[in-house]
Amino acid sequence: MLLVTDPGLEHAGHPQRAARVMLEAGLTVFTFDGVKENPTEREVDAGVVFARTHSVDCIVAVGGGSSMDCAKGINFILTNGGRMADYKGHGKATKPMLPSVGVPTTAGTGSEAQCYALITDERSHLKMACGDKKAAFRVAILDPELTISQPKSVTAVTGIDAVAHAIESHVSTKRNPLSQMCSLAAYRYLEANFETVLRSPNDLDARSGMQVGSHLAGMAIENAMLGVCHSCANPLTAHYGITHGIAIGVMLPHVIRFNAAHSPEIDHLYAELLGDYGPANGRPAAEALAARVTELTAAAGLPQSLKECGVSETILHLLAEEANQQWTARFNPRPVVEADIHKLYQSAW
Protein backbone atom coordinates (compact mmCIF):
# COMPACT_ATOMS: atom_id res chain seq x y z
CA MET A 1 0.00 0.00 0.00
CA LEU A 2 1.47 3.36 -1.06
CA LEU A 3 0.45 6.33 1.09
CA VAL A 4 1.03 9.60 -0.79
CA THR A 5 1.07 12.79 1.28
CA ASP A 6 3.04 15.97 1.92
CA PRO A 7 5.39 16.57 4.87
CA GLY A 8 3.45 19.62 6.01
CA LEU A 9 0.60 17.41 7.22
CA GLU A 10 2.71 15.43 9.66
CA HIS A 11 2.27 17.97 12.46
CA ALA A 12 -1.50 17.49 12.20
CA GLY A 13 -1.08 13.71 12.39
CA HIS A 14 -3.26 12.91 9.38
CA PRO A 15 -0.80 10.66 7.49
CA GLN A 16 0.12 8.85 10.71
CA ARG A 17 -3.56 8.27 11.48
CA ALA A 18 -4.17 6.91 7.97
CA ALA A 19 -1.17 4.62 8.21
CA ARG A 20 -2.28 3.36 11.63
CA VAL A 21 -5.77 2.50 10.34
CA MET A 22 -4.29 0.55 7.43
CA LEU A 23 -1.75 -1.24 9.63
CA GLU A 24 -4.51 -2.25 12.03
CA ALA A 25 -6.32 -3.72 9.03
CA GLY A 26 -3.29 -5.92 8.37
CA LEU A 27 -1.93 -3.94 5.44
CA THR A 28 1.71 -3.06 4.82
CA VAL A 29 2.09 0.69 4.33
CA PHE A 30 4.90 2.62 2.65
CA THR A 31 4.68 6.42 2.99
CA PHE A 32 5.87 8.74 0.22
CA ASP A 33 5.84 12.31 1.52
CA GLY A 34 7.80 13.98 -1.26
CA VAL A 35 4.80 15.94 -2.55
CA LYS A 36 5.22 19.68 -3.08
CA GLU A 37 2.67 22.35 -4.00
CA ASN A 38 1.85 22.24 -7.73
CA PRO A 39 3.72 18.94 -8.25
CA THR A 40 5.96 18.54 -11.25
CA GLU A 41 7.16 15.49 -13.15
CA ARG A 42 10.13 15.38 -10.74
CA GLU A 43 7.91 14.61 -7.73
CA VAL A 44 5.89 12.10 -9.74
CA ASP A 45 9.03 10.29 -10.90
CA ALA A 46 10.40 10.18 -7.35
CA GLY A 47 7.12 8.64 -6.20
CA VAL A 48 7.25 6.06 -8.97
CA VAL A 49 10.76 4.97 -7.98
CA PHE A 50 9.63 4.70 -4.35
CA ALA A 51 6.53 2.70 -5.32
CA ARG A 52 8.48 0.30 -7.54
CA THR A 53 11.00 -0.29 -4.78
CA HIS A 54 8.22 -1.47 -2.48
CA SER A 55 6.07 -3.30 -5.09
CA VAL A 56 2.83 -1.59 -4.06
CA ASP A 57 -0.56 -2.75 -5.31
CA CYS A 58 -2.81 0.11 -4.11
CA ILE A 59 -2.48 3.89 -3.62
CA VAL A 60 -3.98 6.08 -0.90
CA ALA A 61 -3.66 9.88 -1.19
CA VAL A 62 -4.07 11.95 1.98
CA GLY A 63 -3.81 15.72 1.65
CA GLY A 64 -4.82 18.59 -0.59
CA GLY A 65 -5.00 18.77 -4.34
CA SER A 66 -1.24 18.43 -4.75
CA SER A 67 -1.18 15.05 -2.98
CA MET A 68 -4.17 13.89 -5.04
CA ASP A 69 -2.59 15.00 -8.32
CA CYS A 70 0.77 13.47 -7.49
CA ALA A 71 -0.85 10.16 -6.51
CA LYS A 72 -2.70 10.02 -9.83
CA GLY A 73 0.47 10.92 -11.68
CA ILE A 74 2.37 8.13 -9.93
CA ASN A 75 -0.41 5.72 -10.90
CA PHE A 76 -0.12 6.71 -14.58
CA ILE A 77 3.63 6.15 -14.84
CA LEU A 78 3.83 3.17 -12.48
CA THR A 79 1.28 1.19 -14.49
CA ASN A 80 1.65 2.55 -18.03
CA GLY A 81 5.24 3.82 -18.19
CA GLY A 82 6.57 6.82 -20.13
CA ARG A 83 6.36 10.46 -19.01
CA MET A 84 3.47 12.60 -17.80
CA ALA A 85 3.55 14.54 -21.07
CA ASP A 86 2.53 11.29 -22.82
CA TYR A 87 -0.83 11.42 -21.04
CA LYS A 88 -1.68 15.06 -21.62
CA GLY A 89 -5.32 15.12 -22.61
CA HIS A 90 -7.72 12.30 -21.89
CA GLY A 91 -7.86 8.53 -22.20
CA LYS A 92 -4.27 7.84 -23.23
CA ALA A 93 -3.49 5.15 -20.64
CA THR A 94 -3.74 1.76 -22.39
CA LYS A 95 -3.12 -0.53 -19.40
CA PRO A 96 -5.08 -1.05 -16.17
CA MET A 97 -4.17 1.21 -13.26
CA LEU A 98 -3.93 0.48 -9.55
CA PRO A 99 -6.99 0.97 -7.35
CA SER A 100 -6.72 4.16 -5.34
CA VAL A 101 -8.39 6.04 -2.49
CA GLY A 102 -8.56 9.83 -2.04
CA VAL A 103 -8.82 11.44 1.40
CA PRO A 104 -8.88 15.25 1.10
CA THR A 105 -7.70 17.34 4.05
CA THR A 106 -8.83 20.62 2.46
CA ALA A 107 -12.10 21.87 1.02
CA GLY A 108 -10.83 23.29 -2.24
CA THR A 109 -9.65 21.40 -5.29
CA GLY A 110 -12.26 18.64 -5.44
CA SER A 111 -9.50 16.53 -6.98
CA GLU A 112 -10.84 13.45 -5.20
CA ALA A 113 -13.86 13.66 -7.54
CA GLN A 114 -11.85 13.95 -10.76
CA CYS A 115 -9.88 11.60 -13.00
CA TYR A 116 -7.37 14.30 -14.02
CA ALA A 117 -3.87 14.74 -12.62
CA LEU A 118 -2.62 18.33 -12.93
CA ILE A 119 1.16 18.11 -13.21
CA THR A 120 3.36 21.12 -13.92
CA ASP A 121 5.87 20.98 -16.78
CA GLU A 122 9.11 22.23 -15.22
CA ARG A 123 10.35 23.72 -18.47
CA SER A 124 7.28 25.63 -19.65
CA HIS A 125 5.65 26.10 -16.21
CA LEU A 126 2.36 25.08 -17.85
CA LYS A 127 0.06 22.69 -16.05
CA MET A 128 -0.57 19.48 -17.95
CA ALA A 129 -4.03 18.01 -17.50
CA CYS A 130 -3.63 14.24 -17.74
CA GLY A 131 -6.95 12.47 -17.46
CA ASP A 132 -8.20 8.93 -17.70
CA LYS A 133 -11.22 7.24 -16.12
CA LYS A 134 -8.89 4.54 -14.84
CA ALA A 135 -7.02 7.16 -12.80
CA ALA A 136 -10.11 8.17 -10.81
CA PHE A 137 -10.15 7.24 -7.14
CA ARG A 138 -12.25 4.15 -6.50
CA VAL A 139 -13.24 5.64 -3.15
CA ALA A 140 -13.25 9.21 -1.80
CA ILE A 141 -13.52 9.69 1.96
CA LEU A 142 -14.82 13.09 3.09
CA ASP A 143 -14.05 13.70 6.77
CA PRO A 144 -14.63 17.35 7.80
CA GLU A 145 -12.61 16.83 10.99
CA LEU A 146 -9.49 16.60 8.85
CA THR A 147 -10.02 20.16 7.59
CA ILE A 148 -10.11 21.71 11.08
CA SER A 149 -6.31 21.60 11.30
CA GLN A 150 -5.99 23.97 8.32
CA PRO A 151 -4.63 27.44 9.05
CA LYS A 152 -7.13 30.21 8.25
CA SER A 153 -5.07 31.20 5.22
CA VAL A 154 -5.39 27.71 3.73
CA THR A 155 -9.12 27.61 4.46
CA ALA A 156 -9.44 30.93 2.62
CA VAL A 157 -7.48 30.14 -0.53
CA THR A 158 -8.82 26.61 -0.97
CA GLY A 159 -12.37 27.82 -0.34
CA ILE A 160 -12.14 30.55 -2.96
CA ASP A 161 -10.74 28.04 -5.43
CA ALA A 162 -13.75 25.80 -4.83
CA VAL A 163 -16.12 28.76 -5.32
CA ALA A 164 -14.41 29.46 -8.66
CA HIS A 165 -14.78 25.80 -9.66
CA ALA A 166 -18.53 26.02 -9.11
CA ILE A 167 -18.90 29.31 -10.97
CA GLU A 168 -16.64 28.50 -13.94
CA SER A 169 -17.99 25.00 -14.50
CA HIS A 170 -21.57 26.33 -14.39
CA VAL A 171 -21.02 28.45 -17.51
CA SER A 172 -18.37 26.37 -19.30
CA THR A 173 -19.00 25.56 -22.96
CA LYS A 174 -19.12 21.88 -21.93
CA ARG A 175 -21.85 22.50 -19.34
CA ASN A 176 -24.70 19.99 -19.27
CA PRO A 177 -27.61 19.16 -16.95
CA LEU A 178 -25.49 16.85 -14.76
CA SER A 179 -22.61 19.29 -14.36
CA GLN A 180 -24.95 22.20 -13.70
CA MET A 181 -26.83 20.27 -11.05
CA CYS A 182 -23.47 19.73 -9.30
CA SER A 183 -22.16 23.27 -9.82
CA LEU A 184 -25.36 24.87 -8.57
CA ALA A 185 -25.46 22.74 -5.42
CA ALA A 186 -21.72 23.31 -4.92
CA TYR A 187 -22.02 27.08 -5.04
CA ARG A 188 -24.93 27.09 -2.59
CA TYR A 189 -22.96 24.99 -0.06
CA LEU A 190 -19.78 27.03 -0.46
CA GLU A 191 -21.26 30.53 -0.47
CA ALA A 192 -23.36 29.80 2.62
CA ASN A 193 -20.50 28.37 4.69
CA PHE A 194 -17.32 30.16 3.60
CA GLU A 195 -17.56 33.15 5.93
CA THR A 196 -18.64 30.88 8.80
CA VAL A 197 -15.55 28.67 8.65
CA LEU A 198 -13.38 31.79 8.62
CA ARG A 199 -15.11 33.15 11.75
CA SER A 200 -15.60 29.81 13.51
CA PRO A 201 -12.99 27.34 12.26
CA ASN A 202 -14.19 24.56 14.59
CA ASP A 203 -17.77 24.66 13.28
CA LEU A 204 -18.08 21.10 11.95
CA ASP A 205 -21.40 21.75 10.20
CA ALA A 206 -19.84 24.60 8.20
CA ARG A 207 -16.72 22.51 7.54
CA SER A 208 -18.96 19.70 6.26
CA GLY A 209 -20.78 22.13 3.99
CA MET A 210 -17.51 23.37 2.54
CA GLN A 211 -16.21 19.86 1.94
CA VAL A 212 -19.42 18.66 0.29
CA GLY A 213 -19.45 21.84 -1.81
CA SER A 214 -15.85 21.34 -2.86
CA HIS A 215 -16.55 17.72 -3.82
CA LEU A 216 -19.62 18.66 -5.84
CA ALA A 217 -17.63 21.37 -7.61
CA GLY A 218 -15.04 18.71 -8.45
CA MET A 219 -17.79 16.57 -9.93
CA ALA A 220 -18.93 19.56 -11.98
CA ILE A 221 -15.40 20.07 -13.34
CA GLU A 222 -15.18 16.37 -14.19
CA ASN A 223 -18.26 16.73 -16.38
CA ALA A 224 -17.86 20.27 -17.72
CA MET A 225 -14.34 21.75 -17.33
CA LEU A 226 -13.39 25.29 -16.24
CA GLY A 227 -12.64 28.62 -17.95
CA VAL A 228 -10.23 31.48 -18.46
CA CYS A 229 -9.97 32.40 -14.76
CA HIS A 230 -7.93 29.27 -14.10
CA SER A 231 -5.87 29.89 -17.22
CA CYS A 232 -4.99 33.34 -15.87
CA ALA A 233 -4.08 32.01 -12.43
CA ASN A 234 -1.44 29.50 -13.49
CA PRO A 235 1.15 31.95 -14.96
CA LEU A 236 0.82 34.12 -11.84
CA THR A 237 1.82 31.14 -9.74
CA ALA A 238 4.63 30.18 -12.12
CA HIS A 239 6.22 33.65 -12.29
CA TYR A 240 5.49 35.10 -8.87
CA GLY A 241 4.77 32.11 -6.66
CA ILE A 242 1.32 33.54 -5.93
CA THR A 243 -0.80 30.92 -4.22
CA HIS A 244 -3.34 29.49 -6.66
CA GLY A 245 -6.38 30.50 -4.62
CA ILE A 246 -5.14 34.06 -4.23
CA ALA A 247 -4.62 34.39 -7.99
CA ILE A 248 -8.08 32.93 -8.58
CA GLY A 249 -9.70 35.33 -6.12
CA VAL A 250 -8.14 38.38 -7.77
CA MET A 251 -9.08 37.36 -11.31
CA LEU A 252 -12.55 35.85 -10.81
CA PRO A 253 -14.69 39.04 -10.50
CA HIS A 254 -13.16 40.43 -13.70
CA VAL A 255 -13.74 37.16 -15.57
CA ILE A 256 -17.38 37.04 -14.44
CA ARG A 257 -18.04 40.56 -15.77
CA PHE A 258 -16.18 39.81 -19.01
CA ASN A 259 -18.13 36.61 -19.68
CA ALA A 260 -21.55 38.15 -19.22
CA ALA A 261 -20.91 41.32 -21.23
CA HIS A 262 -23.41 41.38 -24.12
CA SER A 263 -24.61 37.86 -23.20
CA PRO A 264 -28.03 37.60 -21.54
CA GLU A 265 -27.67 33.79 -21.56
CA ILE A 266 -24.53 33.81 -19.42
CA ASP A 267 -25.97 36.48 -17.15
CA HIS A 268 -28.99 34.23 -16.65
CA LEU A 269 -26.72 31.34 -15.67
CA TYR A 270 -25.01 33.55 -13.12
CA ALA A 271 -28.46 34.51 -11.82
CA GLU A 272 -29.18 30.79 -11.27
CA LEU A 273 -26.23 30.61 -8.90
CA LEU A 274 -27.41 33.64 -6.95
CA GLY A 275 -30.93 32.24 -6.53
CA ASP A 276 -32.93 34.22 -3.97
CA TYR A 277 -29.99 36.58 -3.60
CA GLY A 278 -30.17 37.62 -7.22
CA PRO A 279 -29.83 41.19 -8.47
CA ALA A 280 -32.53 43.78 -8.02
CA ASN A 281 -33.48 46.98 -9.83
CA GLY A 282 -32.20 45.76 -13.17
CA ARG A 283 -28.64 45.21 -11.95
CA PRO A 284 -26.96 42.48 -14.04
CA ALA A 285 -26.52 39.16 -12.26
CA ALA A 286 -22.86 39.12 -13.26
CA GLU A 287 -22.27 42.37 -11.40
CA ALA A 288 -23.99 41.02 -8.29
CA LEU A 289 -22.05 37.76 -8.43
CA ALA A 290 -18.73 39.54 -8.98
CA ALA A 291 -19.50 41.77 -6.01
CA ARG A 292 -20.30 38.74 -3.85
CA VAL A 293 -17.00 37.09 -4.79
CA THR A 294 -15.21 40.31 -3.85
CA GLU A 295 -17.01 40.26 -0.49
CA LEU A 296 -15.80 36.72 0.12
CA THR A 297 -12.17 37.46 -0.74
CA ALA A 298 -12.28 40.61 1.39
CA ALA A 299 -13.70 38.63 4.32
CA ALA A 300 -10.78 36.26 3.94
CA GLY A 301 -8.28 39.13 3.91
CA LEU A 302 -7.04 38.22 0.44
CA PRO A 303 -5.48 40.74 -1.99
CA GLN A 304 -7.88 42.60 -4.26
CA SER A 305 -5.54 43.42 -7.17
CA LEU A 306 -2.51 42.10 -8.99
CA LYS A 307 -0.62 45.24 -8.00
CA GLU A 308 -1.24 44.39 -4.36
CA CYS A 309 0.25 40.93 -5.10
CA GLY A 310 3.46 42.55 -6.34
CA VAL A 311 2.87 41.86 -10.03
CA SER A 312 4.61 44.25 -12.42
CA GLU A 313 2.41 45.86 -15.06
CA THR A 314 5.17 45.35 -17.62
CA ILE A 315 4.84 41.55 -17.46
CA LEU A 316 1.12 41.40 -18.17
CA HIS A 317 1.64 40.79 -21.89
CA LEU A 318 3.82 37.76 -21.14
CA LEU A 319 1.31 36.44 -18.64
CA ALA A 320 -1.42 36.81 -21.26
CA GLU A 321 0.62 34.90 -23.82
CA GLU A 322 1.13 32.01 -21.40
CA ALA A 323 -2.45 32.02 -20.10
CA ASN A 324 -3.71 31.78 -23.67
CA GLN A 325 -1.87 28.44 -23.96
CA GLN A 326 -3.64 26.95 -20.94
CA TRP A 327 -6.28 24.36 -21.83
CA THR A 328 -9.09 25.72 -19.64
CA ALA A 329 -9.32 28.94 -21.69
CA ARG A 330 -10.71 26.86 -24.55
CA PHE A 331 -13.86 26.08 -22.53
CA ASN A 332 -14.61 29.67 -21.50
CA PRO A 333 -18.22 30.63 -22.39
CA ARG A 334 -17.03 33.79 -24.13
CA PRO A 335 -14.26 33.01 -26.64
CA VAL A 336 -10.94 34.56 -25.66
CA VAL A 337 -7.76 35.44 -27.50
CA GLU A 338 -4.51 36.72 -26.07
CA ALA A 339 -5.61 40.37 -26.32
CA ASP A 340 -8.74 39.63 -24.26
CA ILE A 341 -6.68 37.94 -21.55
CA HIS A 342 -4.29 40.90 -21.50
CA LYS A 343 -7.27 43.18 -20.85
CA LEU A 344 -8.43 40.91 -18.04
CA TYR A 345 -5.01 41.17 -16.41
CA GLN A 346 -5.07 44.95 -16.84
CA SER A 347 -8.50 45.13 -15.18
CA ALA A 348 -7.23 43.06 -12.27
CA TRP A 349 -4.02 45.06 -11.96
Image (cartoon, helix red, strand yellow):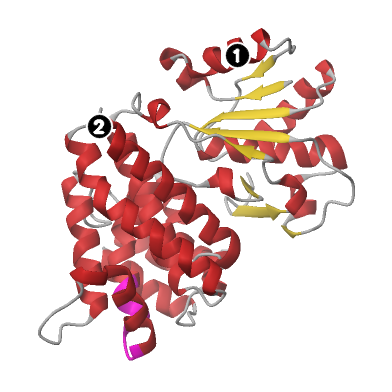
Residue type at the position of mark 1? Val
- 99 vs 317: above or below: above
Which quadrant of the rendered structure holds the C terminus?
A: bottom left
Label 2 crowd bin: few (<14), some (14–19), many (20+), radius 10 Å:
some
Task: Classify residue 76 by image quadrant.
Answer: top right
Label 1 crowd bin: few (<14), some (14–19), many (20+), radius 10 Å:
few
Residue type at the position of mark 2? Asp
Q: What element carries label 1?
A: helix
Q: Can residue 208 be seen in this view?
A: yes
Q: Which residue is drawn at 50% across and 47% down?
A: 110
Measured as percent of width and height from the top left, residue 246 is found at 33, 48
- Specify the label residue 203 is tagged with: 2
Measured as percent of width and height from the top left, residue 257 is found at 29, 76
Which quadrant of the rendered structure holds the N terminus?
A: top right
Q: Residue at x 25, y 69 (%)?
A: 289
Q: Is mark 2 on a helix, strand or loop?
A: loop
- Nearest the viewer among 247 and 192 is 192
For the residues labelled 2 and 1, the Cα–Cα distance comes to 25 Å
Measured as percent of width and height from the top left, residue 215 is found at 48, 48
Task: Classify residue 155 by image quadrant.
Answer: top left
Q: Residue at x 61, y 41 (%)?
A: 69
Q: Main secondary structure of the magenta part?
A: helix
Measured as percent of width and height from the top left, residue 223 is found at 59, 64
- Residue at which label 1 appears: 21
Is 67 left, or right, of 41 in this rendering? left
Task: Classify residue 344 by image quadrant.
Answer: bottom left
Give the magenta range.
256-264
- Nearest the viewer among 179 and 152 is 179
Is 115 left, or right, of 9 in this rendering? right
